[in-house]
Image: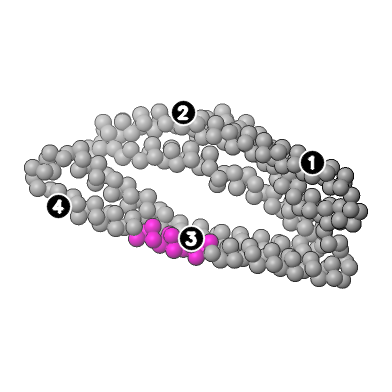
C-alpha cells in the first residue's frame, strides 16, 4: 500500500484540486437565483437575464467537465491498485494453499476488488467533497448569521444521523461478509468434490450447513436493511425540515426588510 500511495499520490492530489473548483462551482445556481430575484425582476432587463444565464450555463458545463475528469482519475487509481496488489495477493494465496493443510481462502482477491470499488465509487468522492461543506455554511452566514445558524444546526443533525447509520449497520455488514464467505466456501467445496459428496451421501449434511450460513446472511442483511432504511427516512425528513426552516427564517427577514427577496 505504501508503494501504491507513492505511485498514485498525484491522482488523489489532482482529484482534491478539482474538488475545490467543483464545490465552488456548485454555488452557481444559488448565486444565479439571487441575481435573478434581486436584479432581473427589479430591472426587467432581458439583456441582464441573458448574460447571467450564459454565465451560469458556462459554469455548470465547466463543473460537468471537472467531475468527469475527477471520476476518471479515481477510476485510474482503482485500476492501478488492482494491477499492483492483485498479483501479490494471488501469489500469497497460492503460497498459503501449498503450505497450509487447510487450504487457502481466496477472499483476499475479493478484498482487492472491494478496495478498487471504494476508490472508484461515490464514497471517496463524498470524502473529497465533505471538507468544503464549511464553505457553504460560511456563505449562508454571510447572508445572515441566523440563517447560518440554522444551516449549521441542520448539518450537525445530518452528521449525527450518518454516524448512527454507520454504527447501526457496521456489525450486520461485517456478519454479512463473514457468513457469505462461509456459505460460499461450503458451495465451492461441494462443487469441487461433487462425486465424493454424492457417493458418501453427504449432500443433506452439506445442504444443512449451507442453509445455516445462508440464514445467517439473510438475518444480518435484514438487520442492516431495517436500520439503514429507518435512519435514511429520518435523514430525508430532516433535509426537508431544514429547507422549510431556512425558507421560514428567510421570509421573516424579507418581511422585516432586513434582506432582499433573492
* Place of residue 63 in the rendered image (x, y in percent of width and height, measured from the top left): 69, 40
Residue holding disc 4 = 204
Dot placed on the residue nearer the N-terminal end, 4 or 2: 2
Query: Residue at horizontal 40%, vertical 53%?
Result: 174
In the orientation shown, which residue stands out farthest toward the right? 43
Query: Dot 4: what SS?
Result: helix
In magenta stretch: residue 139 = no
Dot placed on the residue nearer the N-terminal end, 4 or 1: 1
Query: Dot 3: what SS?
Result: helix
Residue holding disc 3 = 228
* Place of residue 85 in the rendered image (x, y in percent of width and height, measured from the top left): 45, 32
* Place of residue 28 in the rendered image (x, y in percent of width and height, measured from the top left): 76, 47
Residue 71's quadrant in the figure? top right
Q: Are marks 4 and 1 in contact (CB under 8 Å)?
A: no
- How far apart are the alpha carbons under marks 1 and 2? 44 Å
Q: Give the range drawn in magenta.
A: 219-232
Query: Residue at horizontal 89%, vertical 53%?
Result: 44
Query: Dot 2: what SS?
Result: helix
Q: Do the residues labelled 2 and 3 touch (CB within 8 Å)?
A: no
- How far apart are the alpha carbons under marks 2 and 3? 34 Å
Tell me: residue 40, above or below residue 101: below
* Place of residue 83 in the rendered image (x, y in percent of width and height, measured from the top left): 46, 28
Tell me: residue 158, above or below residue 132: below
Crowding at label 1, few (<14), some or many (≥20) Cα neighbours within 10 Å?
few
Crowding at label 4, few (<14), some or many (≥20) Cα neighbours within 10 Å?
few
Dot placed on the residue nearer the N-terminal end, 3 or 1: 1
Residue holding disc 1 = 54
Dot placed on the residue nearer the N-terminal end, 1 or 2: 1
In magenta stretch: residue 228 = yes
Dot placed on the residue nearer the N-terminal end, 2 or 3: 2
Amino acid at each position: 500500500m505504501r508503494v501504491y500511495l507513492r505511485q498514485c499520490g498525484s491522482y488523489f492530489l489532482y482529484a482534491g484540486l478539482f474538488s475545490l473548483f467543483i464545490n465552488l462551482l456548485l454555488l452557481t445556481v444559488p448565486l444565479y437565483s439571487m441575481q435573478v430575484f434581486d436584479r432581473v425582476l427589479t430591472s426587467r432587463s432581458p439583456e441582464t437575464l441573458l448574460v447571467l444565464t450564459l454565465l451560469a450555463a458556462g459554469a455548470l458545463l465547466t463543473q460537468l467537465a471537472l467531475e468527469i475528469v475527477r471520476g476518471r482519475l479515481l477510476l485510474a487509481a482503482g485500476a492501478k491498485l488492482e494491477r499492483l496488489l492483485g498479483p501479490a495477493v494471488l501469489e500469497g494465496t497460492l503460497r498459503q494453499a501449498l503450505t497450509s493443510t487447510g487450504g487457502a481462502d481466496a477472499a483476499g482477491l475479493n478484498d482487492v476488488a472491494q478496495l478498487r470499488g471504494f476508490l472508484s465509487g461515490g464514497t471517496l468522492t463524498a470524502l473529497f467533497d465533505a471538507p468544503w461543506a464549511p464553505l457553504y455554511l460560511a456563505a449562508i452566514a454571510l447572508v445572515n448569521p441566523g440563517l447560518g445558524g440554522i444551516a449549521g444546526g441542520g448539518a450537525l443533525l445530518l452528521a449525527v444521523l450518518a454516524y448512527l447509520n454507520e454504527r447501526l449497520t457496521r456489525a450486520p455488514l461485517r456478519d454479512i461478509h463473514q457468513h457469505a464467505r462461509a456459505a460460499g466456501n461450503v458451495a465451492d467445496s461441494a462443487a469441487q468434490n461433487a462425486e465424493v459428496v454424492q457417493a458418501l451421501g453427504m449432500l443433506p449434511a452439506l445442504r444443512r450447513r449451507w442453509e445455516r450460513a445462508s440464514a445467517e446472511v439473510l438475518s444480518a442483511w435484514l438487520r442492516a436493511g431495517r436500520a439503514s432504511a429507518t435512519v435514511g427516512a429520518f435523514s430525508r425528513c430532516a433535509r426537508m425540515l431544514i429547507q422549510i426552516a431556512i425558507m421560514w427564517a428567510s421570509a421573516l427577514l424579507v418581511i422585516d426588510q432586513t434582506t432582499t427577496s433573492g
